[in-house]
Image (spheres, coloured by chain):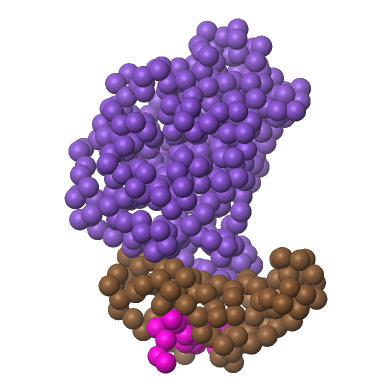
Amino acid sequence: MSLKNKVAIVGADETDEIGIVPNMTPIMMHAQAARNALRDAGIDKSEVDAVFTCGIGGMASVQICEYLGIVPRYTDSTMTGGSSFVIHVEHAAAAIAAGLCDVALITHGESGHSGRMRRGPRGGGFMMDTSLPSAQFEMPFGVAGPPSTYAMAAMRHMHQYGTTSEHLAEIAVATRKWAQLNPKAMMRDPLTIEDVLSSRWIAYPFHIYDCCLVTDAGGAVVVVGADRARDLTKKPVWVLGSGEASTHQSLLGMDDVTRTPARYSGKAAFEMAGVTHKDIDVVEVYDSFTYTALVTIEELGFCEKGEGGPFLANQRTAPGGDFPMNTNGGGLSYTHPGMYGMFILIEAVRQLRGECGPRQVAGAKLACVNGTGGLLSATGTLILGAD
Amino acid sequence: MAEYAKPVPYPSPESQPFWDGCKRHELRLPYCPKCEQFFFYPRQFCPRCFSWEIEWRACSGRGTLYTFAIQYRAQMPGFTPPYVTAIVQLDEGPRLMTNLVGVDPSPESIRCDMPVEVVWEDATDEITLPMFRPATS
């Protein structure tokens, strides 16, 4: 059984404020984003019978159901880092198609910025379980978290394929141009290639403008079956294809650090949707770093392996370019609270509904969405379409 | 011994032979006789063929720099940036996460695939860490 056209995303929204939001905790943002997404869908909270979430306590979906006052028929706390919420859409589609639930709510909320200042014990840190491989074989060498590891993957890509700092800077600059068209984006000042190349190093080969923001934000989407979707006021955004994959936790688990599991999740999503890369109107991919977007475009098959740099060069992905990508301004310039996948979903929905105002990609009917979580570890790909 | 400020590994039952080797300044890695290959990190089984008949064998301590990054911010307590994180590909096949030491931590001084060799950092009475430096011969 294929999941093609079985479900649609019918509601999508962020919290009222995103960026620096010190007066809200993560769980408050889950709730406010849920309210906003349900309002966008025109669906009452009492109809929600399934919750998909992660990143909030050890039993995330149970916690959120209690907090929102929902007694679910189905929950899923799948945690694959930033790709989680993209993968939740596939899981929701499967549950709805199997008749296990009808209205699926996927929620996110993180104080990526303000949480660093809060008092009290913090969970989920890298030091939690000293028996895990990364605690033994990576942390003692000062390797922990995304900048230190993604930089090593990017370095090998540069060595192996001739990718340059200029190639990476092209992405930062093009993404900033989209952010300048998005009033919700945090970073809207003009940015040039030279600005990027002359900025300070965070982890060579990454300049600071190669790295995503660290913000506070919440988001939510609502997924329902095809019949219900057609009854609602707003245009349904159909799930035409989906795929998920993970290949490793640590870079040490990768045979080739220049690859990502998007080559599997992307293949599955395109095959299910029955569309080709040339059919895609707008591309929303995870840009925790400029490199993440570059390598993902390769792995999804938009170009040959290793040619992402030249393929995305000359501001091709910027407004007016022939390969519109990360049209909200991305994790690089719009927002990135830690697990950014929710926000690429929201932007894809808005583009396919034609709600994006000055940054609208004209006539966008088909979007490719890819979330990347962990250390290039786990990906979810969706092909979404409007009628 | 002066107090060691960086995170130290806590050996687990399956990794103890590795850390015991390091303590003796010997790079001993798990080896699968069925696959005739080393693997890393240590497990009680081979992650390729899932055989639980594994051995520990000594490696030469020589390899190449598969990839690296120069960390300009301390990602962990005790580190003074800039420092070089690296993945070394041993001549025997497996890869280790490590630090590249004995080299100027600048983009001009380091390149992927350069030959490297192990050098030992005695961190505490119990723990010695395998670091790597540019090969001297």
For residue A221, what is the image quadrant? top right
Tint of chain A: purple
Position of B72 compared to A98: left or right? left
Position of A168 compared to A275: left or right? left
Position of A274 compared to A315: left or right? right
Magenta highlight: main SS? strand
Q: Is residue A175 above or below residue A209?
A: above
For residue A172, what is the image quadrant? top left
Identify the chain drawn in brown. B
Q: Which residues are magenta?
A: B115-137
The residue that appears at 30% across and 76% down in the rendered structure is: B109
Number of marks drawn:
0
Asked if the stretch drawn in magenta spans residue B136, the answer is yes
Q: Is residue A182 above or below residue A353?
A: below
The residue that appears at 20% across and 49% down in the rendered structure is: A195
For residue B17, what is the image quadrant? bottom right
Relative image position of residue B95 (x, y in whole percent): 55, 72
Relative image position of residue A199 (x, y in whole percent): 23, 55
